Amino acid sequence: MSKPKVQEELIIFDTPIGYGKTVVNFEIAKLHTRTPLSIPIIIQRAKKPGPVILFSAGIHGDEVNGVEIVRQIITRKYNIPDRGMTICLPVVNVFGFLNQDRKFPDGRDLNRSFPGSEKGSLASRFAHFIMAEIVPHVSHIIDFHTGGASRFNYSQIRYNPEDAECEALAKLFGTKFILRASTRDHSFRDAASALGKKVLMFEGGKSKHLDRIVTKSGLDGTLRVLHQLKIRDCSKELAKLDKPEPPIIIESSSWVRAKYSGMFRSYKANGSYVQKGERIGTLTDPFGDFEKAVKAKWDGHIICISHNPIVNQGDALVHISTKVLER
Ligand SMILES: [Zn+2]
């Protein structure tokens, strides 16, 4: 059956986007075996015009929580809009996803390669195509990430504090913490925000790990945003969720680092509040002689804990808020 004729023609990667579902396979490159590598982009377009939201995950190939969140958005059909359009990019860095590696095969971090260039490195070309082909069509973006290496982020939304709409969406997303974090140069958020796109960055859990609480908080927040933007009526799903507490708005944060090399055990729950001088963990040697307390150096909320048991002097252990705004 042919698709109904669309009023406004829309073309992404040479594919006309009609109403309903379109899957665009973006061929990025060939592997050294000549195997073609493509990433599927799942697009759902409503007849009624409206906001266009992009859900992207796996910019860092080993951050699987985000991939799982976008997969669930698709499986549960939350991406079918009443108005506007949704674009799902569940695995952006498919190279890294295959190898379970954060980076691109050329060793570059895709999230430091934006806006990219057509003739640059592989990561830079890839960034360029996302910016040229997808980003111009969208109004809103939720980019899903997790902590790098073994750093477990308590679910949080990061947003541009200068953007009032981003702030309002971050507040209603429903995570316990939201971080007023200025963008990092050459990140996807930085490049898309510069074009006026409303970008929320979700951070939750750690790489190479799936966490049900994290994926649920990402999914619940997505429903709240879809509903707020009237892209999809999510009142049925939202009625089953608890109303979230107002978020704790974190203005700045800093890491407690390892004074010594050793084995690190943390004592505190992620997301909890600690006071200056409180013992938050220990550093030990394997031989039973050495044991040093790791203490909080200021009062604050724990927003990330390293789950790496073996640490070197200077390694980041516990990420604690340093300045919190009044709710
Ligand atoms: Zn990431």
Image (spheres, rainbow, N blue to C red):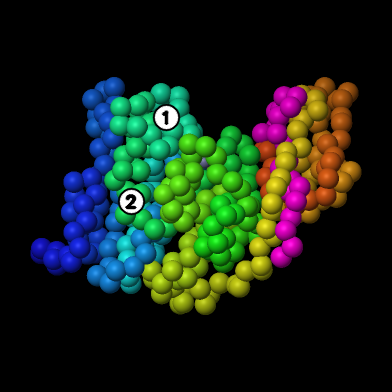
The residue that appears at 87% across and 29% down in the rendered structure is 291
**Which residue matches tag 2?**
136
Mark 1: few, some, or many residues within 10 Å (few <14, many ≥20)?
many
Name the side, left or right, on which 6 lies relative to 309.
left
Which stretch did the figure color magenta? 308-327
Between 305 and 301, the residue placed more toward the observer is 301
Residue 35 in view (yes/no): yes
Between 24 and 85, the residue placed more toward the observer is 85
Q: Quadrant of residue 175?
A: bottom right
The residue that appears at 67% across and 38% down in the rendered structure is 307
Q: In the image, is residue 246 part of the stretch drawn in magenta?
A: no
The residue that appears at 38% across and 69% down in the rendered structure is 231
Q: Which mark is residue 104?
A: 1
Q: In the image, is residue 318 part of the stretch drawn in magenta?
A: yes
Q: Which quadrant: the C terminus?
A: bottom right
Name the side, left or right, on which 319 lies relative to 195.
right
Helix, strand or loop at label 1? It is: loop
Along the polypeptide, which appears first: circle 2 or circle 1? 1
Q: In the rendering, at what x and y percent does residue 124 appear?
A: 38, 31
